[in-house]
Image (spheres, grey):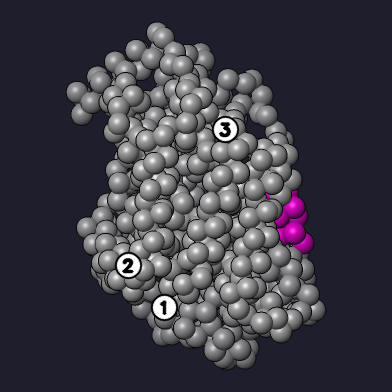
Amino acid sequence: MKKITNIIFENMEKYSVSKHKTSYQISWLTFSLSGGFLVIFVLMALLDLDGLSHRVNVAASWSTKHFGAYWQALLLLTFLIGIYVASTRSGKVRLGNKKNPEMSTFKWFSIIMCTLLAGGGVFFAAAEPMAHFISPPPLFNIPSASESAIFPALAQSYMHWGFLSWAILGSLTTIIFMHLHYDKGLPLKPRTLLYPIFGDRAINSWIGSVIDAACVMALVAGTVGPIGFLGLQVSYGLSELFSIENTFSTQFLIILFLIGVYTVSTVSGIHRGIQMLSRFNILLALLLMIFILIAGPTNFIFDSYLQSTGLYITNFFSMATYRADTVWLDSWTVFFWGWFLGYGPLMAMFIARISNGRKIREMIFSVSIGAPIVTMFWFTIVGGSGLAFEIANPGVISIPYAGSDMPAALLAITQQLPAGFIISFLFLVLTTMFVATTGDSMTYTISMVMTGTDNPPAPLRIFWGVIMGVLAMILVSVGSGGIATLQYFIVVTAVPVSIILLPSLWTAPMIARKMARDQGLI
């Protein structure tokens, strides 16, 4: 460990003397590796979807079996170390090269909320608490579909979408990107995370391009999947609400509309399209939350939130380190951890891009504490309402949800509310826009990886926005299995990505402390 520490300090001293020049040229090796993978994957899906699904499932099972415990430890340590750094004097460090934040706190926080876990959070908020209610997590020895299963069901959902998942997406790694890019001029690419360990070899060798490509493939798998999945989900919703035929043509038009929205947004940039779309999403989500709080099971929501949060906190470490039932873990917790890990490096890059001028403490507490609290409350409002309706009228939510039908679960919940038709339609709009905000930010971030800059050229953003949408259309055309297979593939890509993220556990605190000394805080 002492040798590693010496290497880190040597590299830090080296880049402190002479700044690296950020390259504005496209990394064609990274482009070819990531683009080539996507072409091969789509071709295999078109030629032999069943064979591809089998191979991906085998690889995903191997990944969760051999790396599941490591992923659990990595997420837990990332959260704890991040909170520690934020709580010390290093937390007062101002990140980036600006004395004040580039945007207001509300706009900044809105982008964060809409970018990270928002796209999956709408349908999962309805479906996951119901899933744990029907089949309680093995850690809690309680009967299924009983009132005693309510709070554990919500608490387990909090574990999957709460503190740990948010922390891995943008806390320690964001510190590294902010310092090495904005202060030292290194490229805004995943390979930069390994610079404190490997020095120039991480930046200038072909290995760096492979690292970037692996992270891009993970992000594309995690973004194309939701785009295609949204086409399937919204098409189902329109069929239920408006009797519009649920066909590929409908799904095609939905995805085409989505491509147009997020491509225009990403081209207009961080301070226009992405910011405006995020604010619209947040305001619509707030209006729906307020409506459900007033018109829905108000007392049940607040009681469930308080008790489930208490259960989540008191069992936090037990849930985070649970290993007794690996079959259940691989289907739930470890699967989620692999999914979120795949997003990790590029999500941290995006947070770095929008956080110039923020303090470490502000960034970490907002991402690792504030955002999870909001997410947990959202899950309680949507999923908690579903549990209240199910208790009052058994089967009203669980029967539509049977077979893990997430859009059916959401519509079943919203249609129990006053003005159910309108609320159901607004939830479809909200989900579409949330996926759009994920699409625009991810398109922007992939383009940053290709150039290493925080302002990639518009044609490159358009290319990646369109290509991801087209890939989603192609995979949807072969059936939902194509999208599901791609989503499972992100768990496989999480293996190399999680290794890339590991050094941040000690390099981020060291860099934060060095920045604190440079800024005269210690």
Magenta-tinted stretch: 278-287
- Horizontal placement of 236 versus 52: left or right? right
Query: Taking the image as drawn, is residue 210 in sight?
Result: yes
Residue located at (54% from left, 46% from top): 464
In the rendered structure, find residue 52 and report the number of the disc placed on it.
2
Is residue 428 on the magenta stretch?
A: no
SS at mark 3? loop
Please identify the residue farthest to the bottom as the structure is shown.
394
| Residue 189: percent from left, percent from top | 44, 33
Residue located at (64% from left, 48% from top): 263
Q: Crowding at label 1, few (<14), some or many (≥20) Cα neighbours within 10 Å?
A: many
Are the residues flagged by discs 1 and 2 in contact, CB closer than 8 Å? Answer: no
| Residue 188: percent from left, percent from top | 47, 30
Residue with the mark numbered 3: 456
Residue 94 in which image quadrant: top right
- Say whether disc 3 or disc 1 marks the residue closer to the N-terminus: 1
Residue located at (54% from left, 86% from top): 398
| Residue 269: percent from left, percent from top | 67, 38
**In what quadrant of the picture does the N terminus appear?**
top left
Residue with the mark numbered 1: 136
C-alpha gap between disc 3 and disc 1: 46 Å
Residue situated in front as seen by the camera: 360 or 498:
498
Q: Crowding at label 3, few (<14), some or many (≥20) Cα neighbours within 10 Å?
A: many
Amino acid tagged 1:
Pro
